[in-house]
Image (cartoon, rainbow, N blue to C red):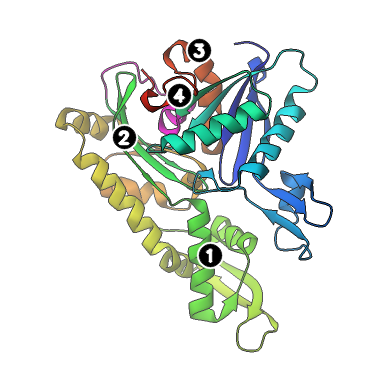
């Protein structure tokens, strides 16, 4: 792996970059702050994240990716260029870049990602599907004819796949991830408590007290926001029961998708999954009780990968060992696959 090889996990919530043999060198929120008066970007990453929900109307702080794909080409290009410049410095040779993409992403969306990386300074761009990258990053050997299932819950998408013998046998991708979970909490607080809260508050509640398997009401948290009726700031105490109720729809969607993938998987591989279990990766893997819920549903052990948030990024870095098996993003993009 060359010192100028860059692996990018371009996530909806976070962008994680690996560089050469150094491993992960950058992990920052996928946020851009743009000044409409000056028509220029004023911050990216962590600095821009601090501005979410706290800026005047002429400054926009937003995620340029939604549901795992680019929603704002210009802002994404600027963000990727700034991050590549930050990790590569003044390289004389343009880097090779491996980008991960969700399962079932369209050719148009793939091409937008490839062109963004090329405009940001890459000399060659490869694509790898997120489930494959997640399994590689989790240390799972997928070269053998032995079925393994991965559930990768990112910020914008949830990718569920069964892999065997270096390829994906069956898979699905949901436009649902950590951001949709946050939105469900925001909606719940509005409906039940008539309280308007922001994304960061919802995310904090999710991380602090979520238990989607067996809540007992002992985990509580004070949530602050604006009362809908009076328009004044108030504080409401919620428990893990509230979070479970808020997330019931999202979790049922993930469980239903797991069922759908298993139904499309050959019986022999389903037997392997019963033995090998399910690998849980991505930031959603840290959702309280989710691993136990999946275990009770599938009837097989559900294992949370080591440092699940970084799994895809580690796998993207490892993908440079397999560039002979990856098609360049601009070469026959409709036939892209991991062999």
In the rendered image of this protein, does residue 325 appear above or below residue 38?
A: above
The tag earlier along the polypeptide, 2 or 3, is 2
Dot placed on the residue nearer the N-terminal end, 1 or 4 = 4
Which type of secondary structure does the marked residue at label 3 adopt?
helix
In front: mark 2 or mark 3? Answer: 3
Quick one: which residue is furthest to the right in this view?
Answer: 38
Instruction: Indicate the quadrant containing the C terminus: top left, top right, bottom left or bottom right.
Output: top left
User: As rendered, which of 20 and 327 lies closer to the eye?
Assistant: 327
Q: Residue at x 41, y 21 (%)?
A: 332
For the residues bearing labels 1 and 3, Cβ distance under 8 angstroms: no
Query: Which residue reaches farthest left?
Result: 267
Nearest-to-viewer mark from 4 and 2? 4
Answer with the quarter of the image where residue 303 lies: top left
Q: Which mark is residue 321?
A: 3
Residue assigned mark 1 = 219
**Badge number at residue 136:** 4
Does the residue at mark 4 contact the one at mark 2 (Cβ under 8 Å)? no
Mark-to-mark CA distance, 1 and 3: 45 Å
Q: How packed is label 1: few (under 14 Cα within 10 Å), some, or many (20 or more)?
A: some
**Residue 86, located in which quarter of the rendered image?**
top right
Q: Alpha carbon of mark 2 to alpha carbon of mark 1: how far?
A: 29 Å
Q: Is residue 306 visible?
A: no
Looking at the rendering, the stretch of residues picked out in magenta corresponds to: 129-146
């Amino acid at each position: 792996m060359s010192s100028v090889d860059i692996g990018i996990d371009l996530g909806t919530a976070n962008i994680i970059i690996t560089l050469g043999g150094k491993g992960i060198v950058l992990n920052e929120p996928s946020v851009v702050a743009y000044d409409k008066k000056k028509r220029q970007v004023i911050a990216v990453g962590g600095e821009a994240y601090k501005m979410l929900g706290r800026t005047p109307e002429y400054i926009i702080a937003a995620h340029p990716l939604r549901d795992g794909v680019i929603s704002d080409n210009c802002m994404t290009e600027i963000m990727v260029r700034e991050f590549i410049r930050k990790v590569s410095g003044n390289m004389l040779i343009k880097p090779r870049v491996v980008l991960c993409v969700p399962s079932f992403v369209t050719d148009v969306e793939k091409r937008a990602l490839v062109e963004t990386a090329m405009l940001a300074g890459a000399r060659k761009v490869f694509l790898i599907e997120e489930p494959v990258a997640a399994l590689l990053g989790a240390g799972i050997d997928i070269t053998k004819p032995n079925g393994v299932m991965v559930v990768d819950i990112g910020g914008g998408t949830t990718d569920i796949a069964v892999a065997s013998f270096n390829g994906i046998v069956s898979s699905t991708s949901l436009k649902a991830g950590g951001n949709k979970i946050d939105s469900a909490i925001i909606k719940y607080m509005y409906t039940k408590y008539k309280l308007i809260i922001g994304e960061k508050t919802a995310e904090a509640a999710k991380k602090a007290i979520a238990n989607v398997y067996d809540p007992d009401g002992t985990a509580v948290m004070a949530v602050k926001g604006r009362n809908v009726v009076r328009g004044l700031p108030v504080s409401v105490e919620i428990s893990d029961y509230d979070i479970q109720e808020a997330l019931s729809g999202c979790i049922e969607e993930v469980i239903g998708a797991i069922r759908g993938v298993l139904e499309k998987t050959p019986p022999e591989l389903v037997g392997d999954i019963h033995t090998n279990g399910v690998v849980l990766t991505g930031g959603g893997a840290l959702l309280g009780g989710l691993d136990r819920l999946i275990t009770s549903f599938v009837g097989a052990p559900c294992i949370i990968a080591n440092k699940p948030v970084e799994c895809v990024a580690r796998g993207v870095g490892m993908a440079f060992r397999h560039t002979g098996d990856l098609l360049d993003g601009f070469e026959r993009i409709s036939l892209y696959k991991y062999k």
